[in-house]
Image: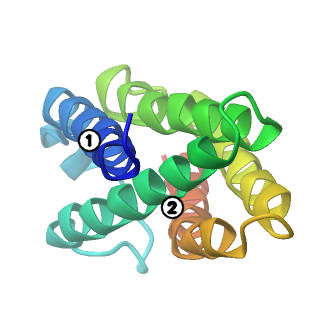
Amino acid sequence: MSKALTYVVFVAIALGGGLAIGVNNLPEEWYQSLAKPPFNPPDWIFGPVWLTLYVLIGIAGARTWLRGHLSVGMLIWAWQMVLNFLWSPFFFGLRMLSASLVVIVLLLGLILAFAANRWNSDRTAALLFVPYAAWVGFATLLNAAIVYLN
């Protein structure tokens, strides 16, 4: 597979998976009825943020794949995608607020592990995960606050 195609495939996996999960786990009246903290962002912000993050995640995954298909970094990348794709079904689909908090805490740990793993061998891939880590850190705090308030 060519380098360019590798990037296209990885971005498509991240974007396509995120879109499929998002469309099938939309916030409904139930979510609107939950008590939320004052720092809860407006609903419209989530789409553009995740669009940007999924592109960055895909690029980081492609860079890691191109440096070693079966590397520890690639395994961490794959598992963080699994957890990323599980959070919305747990939170919005199953309405399991506490379980979704466990998922997002584990996700944040894997995001940080990926950045640490890539830091010396591919600093760009590690840095591509910084905005992702910041957003998921914020989302973890938001998830915890929603669990506490409800």
The quadrant of the image that shows the N terminus is top left
| Residue under label 2 | 139
Kindly indicate whether the residue at mark 1 contacts the one at mark 2 (C-beta within 8 angstroms). Answer: no
Residue 53: % across, % down: 39, 63
Look at label 2 and name its amino acid.
Answer: Ala
Judge by depth and name the residue closer to the eye, 108 or 145: 108
Which residue is found at the position 50% from the left and 69% from the top?
135
Q: In this view, does 122 lie above or below 59?
A: below
Marks 2 and 1: which is nearer the front?
A: 1
Compared across the picture, whether 64 is left or right of 109 comes to left
Amino acid carrying label 1: it is Ala
- Element on which disc 1 rests: helix
Residue 80 as seen in the image, left or right of residue 89: right
On screen, residue 4 versus residue 106, left or right, reads: left
Display colour scheme: rainbow
Q: How many marks?
A: 2
Q: Which residue lies furthest to the front in this view?
A: 2
User: Residue 141 lies in what quarter of the image?
Assistant: bottom right
Q: Is mark 2 on a helix, strand or loop?
A: helix
Instruction: From the viewer's side, name the closer residue of 145 and 56.
Output: 56
Residue farthest toward the top in the current orientation of the protein:
94
- Vertically, is 103 above or below 119? above
**Residue at image point 22% right, 31% down:** 25
Which residue lies at the image location 20% right of the left edge and 51% below the top edge? 32
- Give the image quarter of residue 14: top left
Task: Work out whether 139 lies above or below 75.
Answer: below
Task: For marks 2 and 1, give the CA distance.
Answer: 23 Å
Going from N to C along the chain, the mark reached first, 2 or 1, is 1
Q: Where residue 9 appears, x then y in whole percent?
A: 31, 38
Q: Residue 12 carries which label?
A: 1
